[in-house]
Amino acid sequence: MEITSAVVALAALAQETRLSVYRMLVEAGPDGLAAGRLADGLSVAPASLSFHLKELLHAGLVHSRQDGRYVIYSANYEAMNALLGYLTENCCRGTTAACLPTACCEPANP
């Protein structure tokens, strides 16, 4: 992943509603969810949801497909994994043990 793609993806996720939409789509799995289910699940107005989905689509974080009269949205797991990989590729200078959550989240000794 290039830095410009990472910035676009992170900018798209740096908004509360879009992050909530994205998390809901990640949870839904590859089958995705209809826009109406997203709107109902997050109590977001359809026009507002449309704007946020457009931003996520532009960032390449979600896919959309037509299913009859419904538009189904799903998370782009390849893009998600590429972003995570980009963010962690040089983690702790290659010392992966130092990057484990327990290594940085252990409480300090009194």
Image (spheres, rainbow, N blue to C red):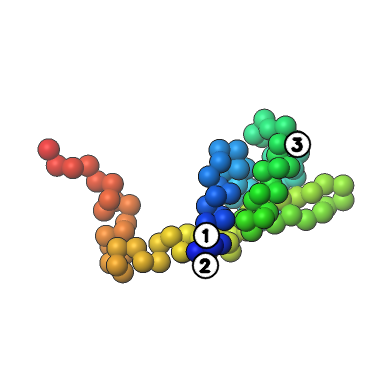
Residue 16 vertical placement versus 32 (above, below): above
Position of 84 compared to 97: left or right?
A: right
Indicate the position of residue 23 as horizontal and vertical percent values: 57, 45
Q: Provide the residue designation for mark 3.
A: 47
Residue type beneath disc 2: Glu
Q: Is residue 76 left or right of residue 35?
A: left
Residue 93, can we see it? yes
Callout 2 crowding tier (Cα within 10 Å): few <14, some 14–19, many ≥20: few
The residue at 82%/54% (across/down) is 66
Check the image and report above or below for 62 versus 89: above
Q: Do tag 1 and tag 2 residues touch (Cβ < 8 Å)?
A: yes
Q: Which residue is mark 2?
A: 2
Residue type, mark 1 in image: Ala
**Quarter assignment of residue 50:** top right
Residue at the left extreme, as displayed? 110
Q: CA distance from mark 2 to mark 3?
A: 31 Å
